[in-house]
Image (cartoon, rainbow, N blue to C red):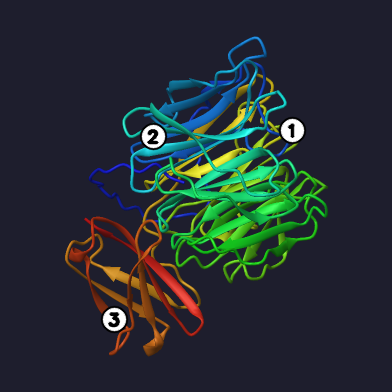
Amino acid sequence: MKILHNFARVAVVFLLCSPALSDGWAEDYLVGHFLQGIVVTGEGYSSFECLYGTDDDMLVTFVNHQGVSRSGDILTLNKSFNNGYTWTRTNTAIQGGGNTLLSPSFAPIPGTDTLLVAIVTDFNTDASNTLDTYKYTYANNITYHRWSQADYSYPGAQEPVSCFVLNNEVSGEIWLFAESSNNWLYLTRSSDGTTWSSSVPVAANVSRPSAVVSSDGQVAVTWTNSISHTILCSIASPSATFSPAVTVSESGAELASPVPGWEHIGNENLGIVWHSEEGESYITISEDQGDSWGDSHPIGTGVYPYINSFEGTRRMAVCYTSTDGDVYVTNALTINAVPSATFVARSHHEAYSGASSRVVYGEEPGQLALFFLSPAVNDLWVTSSRFIAGIEEPETSDNYTVTAGPNPGAGSITVSSTGFGDSVEYSIYSINGRLVDHVQPHNGNAFLVDAGSFPAGMYTIVASGNGRTASCRIVRF
């Protein structure tokens, strides 16, 4: 999920030197304080949501308990315009005595400058919980302007206990998932954040669900089975038709919160991170978009790992929390590189091991942020890093290469490859991973790209053939 702004981008190109994190991490900056302790739906569930956008913007939502004698919990949105150094704050009080708010989540509504915030409201009475949503304009500030309830009326559904939302730009909708008290997962959708589709069931025996959307609108939903504790995954089309659930791993922990990440160049690989009963974090990878899953690969001793991708590339970031309160984080070139990547300890405050920290990329090359909770002081912190970024070029595989020049360019750019012979095909992807063009040269292995026909920005060219791939990046200025 990303915050989108319209502005003229100036691309600065660096040569990629290393897949490891740079040492240029900023200090830990205070995002917000939990007045009566960290608020969580339950161990392993999310207690905050974060976005990292362009122009050094960051946005976070979390909940503050107010106690039964106050007007109810407070839904808090904090925004930073300077990489987390300082924060502005918007509070929305949920009126009605001792109401408890659970599982805050948000996402931009496709095609708008509006943010939809979803929350489960527990009335602490005989009344059922409600699935409440709030709309904010967020481009320059955070301005509240609407409230509504999402549909939760499917027969057999008990009251909602947790929720999360994602932005599906391909379908033009916000997808809002809710877990019920009888461990069913339901989905409702909206194109405007006000009018919602009827709820439909996704799966039963669901605990701690999570989801990610690909650049072509597919949605991977993963969860822990509440009975067997296996990790499962189902893939949905942009029209919300779900495939049968596939077992990812048989050895998940009861409290595991599996999180999926999609490798966005061609949506080739899907990875899920999770932890076992022994407190070991793992990644399991599917190379056929979720139809089957490979072996589980250990990534470190710790719990509640989290994964995020830099759209338009294969780059992945992963973090997990150790039992001694350190957060370990890596920035890898591909999902397949994650198991052997170097994880760096990063946090000057004890991290909360009852829920995941979150590592997220910004929209601009080099932006990487790590959000984590500290139970010792009941605070939410952020630190950011400018990793070595830019043009991942050339990528080689046993003498299979692809190059492009002049780069940057504004007119014709020549693309050529080695190793593929005449069987080569080229796919061009935008920065958000969408297919822009597909070329099969008829004479030789070179062709001209009319960069002048593309909007300014960065693009990835993938050459494929003979069962191999190679890629490079170009900049249209």
Label 1 neighbour load within 10 Å: few <14, some 14-19, many 20+ = few
C-alpha separation, residue under disc 1 versus residue under disc 2: 31 Å
Label 2: few (<14), some (14–19) or many (≥20) C-alpha neighbours in 10 Å:
many
Considering only order in the chain, which callout, 1 or 3, is on the residue closer to the N terminus? Answer: 1
CA distance separating discs 3 and 1: 54 Å
Q: How many marks?
A: 3
- Where residue 402 sits, quadrant-wise, is bottom left
Q: Which residue is mark 2?
A: 57
Foreground pick, 155 / 332: 155
> Disc number at residue 446?
3
Q: Is residue 165 above or below residue 15?
A: above
Measuring 38% from the left and 48% from the top, which residue is drawn there?
110
Residue 204 in the image: x percent, y percent? 72, 54
Q: Position of residue 451 (x, y in %)?
A: 22, 66
Tell me the residue that label 1 is attached to: 324
Image height of 188 relative to 235, above or below: above
Amino acid found under the numbered disc labelled 2? Asp
The foreground one among 133 and 389 is 133
The residue drawn where x is 26% and y is 79% is 447
Q: Which amino acid type is marked by label 3? A: Ala
Q: Which mark is residue 297?
A: none
Other residues around mark 3 within 10 Å, as few (<14) / some (14–19) / many (≥20): many
Residue 198 on image: x %, y %:
54, 50
